[in-house]
Amino acid sequence: MKIDLGPRAEAFRAELRAWLAETVPKDRDERRALMGSPRWEELLVEQRLICVAWPEEYGGRGLSGVEVAVLNEEFARARARRLTRGMGESLVGPSIIVHGTDEQKARFLPRIIDGTDRYCQGFSEPDAGSDLASLTTRGIIDGDELVIDGQKVWTSWYTDATIIFTLCRTDPDAPKHRGISYVLVPVDQPGVEFRPIKQITGERHFAETWFNAARAPLDNVIGGLNNGWAVSMTTLGNERGGGATTQHLQHERMFWDLVDEVRRLGRARDPLVRDRLAWFWSHVAIMRFQGLRLLSALANDNDPGPSASISKMFWSEHQQRLTNYAVDILGPSGALRGPWTSLFLGSRAHTIWGGTAEIQRNIVGERVLGLPKEPPAAGDGP
């Protein structure tokens, strides 16, 4: 099934496909060598294939959501590594573009594109997760600097970060959603301490973050003092991105990896196994059609509505079921550490981060099915 995405998107697809065909080696070993080399990054920078959704005047390509989906699809088709600048590209950069001054745009955006600045996030606190506006980290003005004290948690990918973008309360007397500032804090200073959080997989890409008189120039406050809530809404609005349009691709690869395991174990003709595999394949196909529907909405400039919630709920629960089955079919070896075990353990978090499955169901129930809103919990007020 092919959907007409319009002449601009299809022209971009043809251009990109031709470049990838010319640049990416067909040989697997040669391809892996290029993907892991500095040369691949240089090629992507030359072609402006990093920060592609940013406006051209800020170093991007100004690609639409549809074109970004096309790019993701073509990179996956060519088995090419899609290099991004992480949170700097997807979260901080768009927020600076919308809310930053001209000087801030000129100073921070090029450093994201060339990889000089690498960001991690300091939003959630032990008592301010879903209710982010109840944060208590304080920021006090001292001359031309902001002095920050407080604690954050669930700081992702802190190990490579040079800057943490964080929210702090700079006016404690203002209403709850006001008096908050959005500030870029350099991490290479005594006032910033990361304490790793060991996950069930053994990985430690999360950390608690402690600010103890950490300092940042007032010029690093994006959107102006006490206007951080508006900036954070831009950041959070970009967090889920357009990945749902090509979400099926990684799950398709995972499915075929599972098929390879089944063949290796000599169980490819087992009717019960084949029935289960057919069930998983049907769900990958459903993900693809969900992506096509979302692409159709984007191509026609329509609001996709709660499609992201439906997609998030669907793929996260699918991956848990598939990895459960993979570990089960491996038998005793499934209890040993390996790729499937890591995927099985890691998928436990997928129905929690980015909005829990329960929250996604509430969104779908209220916005798609028209069900009444869930009543407030005791103590939450009317």
Image (cartoon, grey):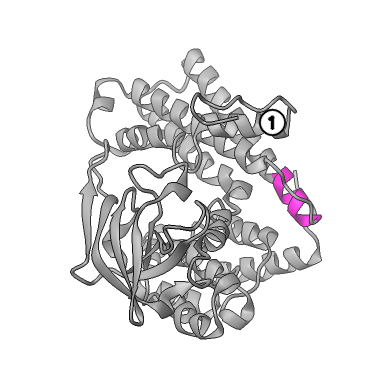
Could you tell me residue 144's position as x and y percent? 36, 82
Q: Toward the viewer: 233 or 44?
A: 233
Q: Extreme front residue here?
A: 173
Residue 11 vertical position relative to residue 102 in the rendered view, above or below: above
Residue 300 vertical position relative to residue 263 in the rendered view, above or below: below
Q: Is residue 185 left or right of residue 332?
A: right
Residue that appears at 73% across and 32% down: 368
Q: Residues within 10 Å of mark 1 (few under 14, many from 20)?
A: some
Residue 270 vertical position relative to residue 96 in the rendered view, above or below: above
Residue that appears at 44% across and 29% down: 320
Q: Is residue 1 left or right of residue 291?
A: right
Could you tell me residue 235's position as x and y percent? 53, 59
Q: Toward the viewer: 316 or 135?
A: 135
Asked if the stretch drawn in magenta spans residue 208, the answer is no
Q: Secondary structure at mark 1?
A: helix
Residue that appears at 27% across and 51% down: 207
The image quarter containing residue 337 is top left
Count of labels in the image: 1
For the N terminus, the quadrant is top right
Q: Can see residue 26? A: no
Asked if the stretch drawn in magenta spans residue 293, the answer is yes
| Residue that badge 1 annotates | 366
Could you tell me residue 318's position as x and y percent? 51, 30
Residue extent of the magenta highlight: 292-300
Q: Can see residue 293? A: yes
Q: Amino acid at mark 1?
A: Glu
Residue that appears at 54% across and 18% down: 275
Helix, strand or loop for the magenta stretch, by majority: helix
For the C terminus, the quadrant is top right
